[in-house]
Each structure stands twice: as structure tokens, then as C-alpha cells.
Image (spheres, helix red, strand yellow):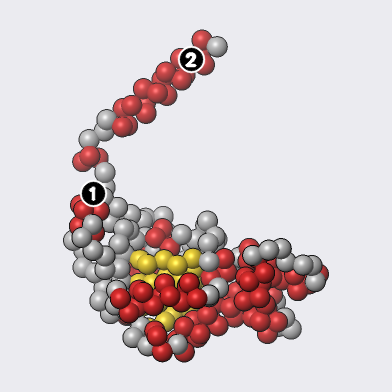
Amino acid sequence: MASNRRAFLTATAAVGALAAAPASAAPAEPDDRPRPTTAPAALAELLAGNRRYATGLPRHPDEGLLRRHTLAAGQHPFAVVVGCIDSRVPPELVFDQGLGDLLCIRTAGQVLDEAVLGSIQYGVAELHIPLVLVLGHERCGAIAATLDHLRTGARVPGHLELLVDEIAPAALRTRSLPGDWAEHTMRANTIWVRDAIRADPAFAAATVTAARFDLDTGLVSLLP
Ligand SMILES: [Zn+2]
């Protein structure tokens, strides 16, 4: 018991020392870095940030007090990311971006509904964001649930039905392809979402691109 208490006191002291560390110990923060204003520049910035993330050398930009205070007056994010809710695919981390950089809209399997479309439109029409990136990822739970439903015919409970209904067409289109059905479905679904956004005149001002996140390598690759 006594040694436990000693260990607790030691740990508490260590936490206290960390909390008292001077602010200058934090990594330098490039709050004044130039923001992309075109779709190609925005995509290049995202892919450069992803390479930093994938190689374990993230800068964690735009997380400090200066950036927070600057943004209090208004936001100018440079990309919309339409991605999955998966806890392993948070766009700000995956692309090594910070506060005010990305407008992220996340649903399971990155499916579309009116709330998602309205949110994208806010980014494109009101905030003049030049790039919309639809981001799918491997081993997606929403894709797996859809395939399970199609294989077994089991009823989909409650609100999950919308997700399965949205993903099922991509699964059915790719069912006869050789190889990994889940991977084929994820790619087909992500491309379908990209094309649906592209075809909508509400988003004509933006470039819409699709990409795949690899859970193993951490890398994002563009889909054709
Ligand atoms: Zn997912």
C-alpha cells in the first residue's frame, strides 16, 4: 500500500512538472503559412500533410493560441472533406492540418443525405472553398454491415437502414468482381458519391475529387 501511495505521489509530481513546463517547449507553429486558394494547391497541401502523417512526422499546425485567436473573427478553410465517421480516419490528423483548415463532414460510409449536401453547399457557396475531397477507407464498418445484410438478408436495425440503402447499389454493382468485395464496394461507393456531388450544379464552383485512405500505411491515394 505504501509503495502504491509513493508511486501515485511520484506520478502526480511528474504531471505537475509537465503542466508547469514553459509554453516555449511546444513545437513552433506556422500560424502565418500561406493558405491554398485554388483546388490544385489545396489538394497538394492535403497530400503533403498526409505524407507527413503517414511517415510519422506530422507538424500539427494551427493548433495554438495565435491561430485560435485569429480564427475567432472568421474562418477560411481551404478544403471540404466528406469522410467516414471511423475513429481511425480523422481528417485533420490524416492530412496534418489544424484549426480552421478543413470543413469536415462525416457520416458512416460517407453517404450523402440532405444535411450533408447542405453542409457541402455551405462550404462551397458561402465559404468559397475550392476543393471537395470524398474520402473512403479500407475495412469500413458501414461497408461491412451492408455486405452482411446482402449476404444474409438479415434485417437492418433502425437508423442503420439509410446507410445500407445508400451503400447497397455500389455493393451490388461490384458483387461479381474477383477479389475483395468490401474493397470494390468502398471504391465504387466513394466514386459514386464524388460523381453525385460533381453532377450537382450547386457545387459547380468546386473541384470534386475522390480518395482512399489506407489504414495500414496511413497513406491517402486518389481514386481514378
Ligand atoms: Zn468507414
* In this view, 90 is above or below 38: above
Quarter of the image where one finds residue 100: bottom left
Q: Which of marks 1 and 2 is nearer the N terminus?
A: 2
Query: Disc 1 versus disc 2: distance between alpha carbons?
Result: 37 Å
**Which residue occupies 32% across, 32% down?**
18
- Residue type highlighted by circle 1: Leu
94 vs 164, left or right, is left
State which mark lies toward you, 1 or 2: 1
Q: What element carries label 1?
A: helix
- List the residue tagged with mark 2: 5
Q: Can residue 137 be seen in this view?
A: no
Could you tell me which quadrant the N terminus lies in?
top right
Q: What element carries label 2?
A: helix
**Which residue occupies 39% across, 60% down?**
92
Quarter of the image where one finds residue 207: bottom left
The numbered dot on residue 65 is 1
Depth order, front residue of 218/86: 86
- Residue type highlighted by circle 2: Arg
Q: Give neighbour class at mark 2: few <14, some 14-19, many 20+ (Cα, 10 Å).
A: few
